[in-house]
Amino acid sequence: MINIDKIRRSVGFIGESEKTIETLTLIGQIAPTNISVLITGDSGSGKEMVAKAIHKNSKRKFEELITVNCAAIPSGIIESELFGHKKGSFTGASEAHAGYFEAAHKGTIFLDEIGELPLETQAKLLRVIEQGEFMRVGDTKIMKTDVRIIAATNRELSQEVKDGNFRKDLYFRMKTINIDVLPLREHISDLHLFVERFGLQFTAKNDIPFKGFSSEALSVMKRYSWPGNVRELKNAVESLLVMNKGERISEEMVIKQLKLDTYKSNLNLPVFVDADADKVERELILKQLLFLRQDVNEIKQVVMSGRGVPVEEVQPSNPALYLPPAGKTVADSDALTQVEDGTFHAIQEDAIGEMTMSELEQEMIERALEKFRGNRRKTARALDISERTLYRKINDYGIQKKFKES
């Protein structure tokens, strides 16, 4: 039985789309073996992440994973880097040098951009794959190595073979197992997961408040083609957070960052999603409700602070759910009452089908309880409400039996 979640956690693999699950399943099937693997895909699509996942879930996971960028090594020294050299084998070789294949013994070597290797080096690589043998540059002694080879390329190797730039025997030897990493545009439903991960990581590292991306901003990002794939997305998220510190990222900010001057004229472009339409609509409604709650909280802080209400009685601004206690009033709070009324009527019930606001609220509480395994203290903190309010809501909705407190 393949444990997809375990594979995902081993390297922080992101994605829940059907195609991502297929890739994770394939990784689970081949990782325990020692067979060589060829990973193909566009630049920036995540080929190195796949290689790491294979290694981390293999029998060699406690040994070295050595990554070699073949495109970054000059052709004149690449054999020395891969296989090592003997002392005095060429000018400047004052010491014997062990190459990557020696260093990776018992482990895994990841040859990124294998299509950049010179033909003569390809012949020596084929010998390593088939016999586990190589010779240092300038030496006559045959050396043995026990190493698993994973290679990656963004080139079309079959065409490179036809053009005489890649050995046919090496190509067929490597393509026995081929994992094709899809470009981001072909699993665009995973984009919000990447955005959240990149955003949280970057803001935590740089001490920047993270208020998330609006649903409109995410919609714009999903309609963009992302020619640079996940790498381009990561750079875009980080740039947006730096240029708009402490703000929720809006549609306009994304359009400006991605230089989508003509986007406004293409608002009806289709957006690919691999989920049920009702489920997608439900998710968008829930996210929009969260944003509305955040705005209300910020307004409450201003109103209460202006009327002398202690700050500790105010729910902090947070992109999470605020659930006002039923029947609770604040002296001289007509404006505050109007704000709360605006919250509950901002989304008309007839505009969201058969779902009422109470049903949306109940679902959000249930999701939070499920996430924290029934721990009500953590749930209340995540939803930005008091434990007392949470207990009352749980009783009101009759969900106390569904989640046992941990």
Image: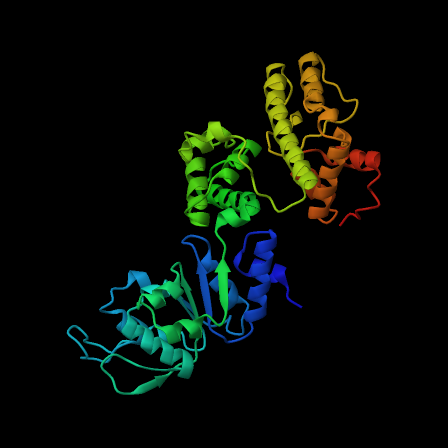
The relative height of residue 186 versus residue 360 in the rendered view (above or below) is below
User: Which residue is rendered at x = 84% and y = 45% of the image?
Assistant: 401
Q: Is residue 262 above or below residue 43?
A: above
Question: In the picture, residue 292 is in which quadrant?
Answer: top right
- Left or right: 91 in relation to 268: left
The answer to whether residue 199 is left or right of residue 154 is: right
Q: Which image quadrant: the N terminus?
A: bottom right
How many numbered callouts?
Answer: 0
Is 348 left or right of 230, judged from the image as shown?
A: right
Query: Toward which corner of the image does residue 296 lie, by quadrant?
Result: top right
- The colour style of the image is rainbow
* Residue depicted at 42% across the width and 36% down the height: 258
Query: Residue 175: x and y, percent?
Result: 46, 70
Q: Position of residue 391 (x, y in %)?
A: 79, 37
Q: Quadrant of residue 378?
A: top right
Q: State whether residue 381 appears in this view.
A: no
Q: Position of residue 339 (x, y in %)?
A: 67, 18
Residue nearer the viewer, 146 or 382: 146
Name the residue at the bottom extreme: 141
Q: Residue 64 location in percent, x, y?
A: 44, 70
In the figure, is residue 286 to the left or right of 393?
A: left
Residue 398 visible in the displayed image: yes
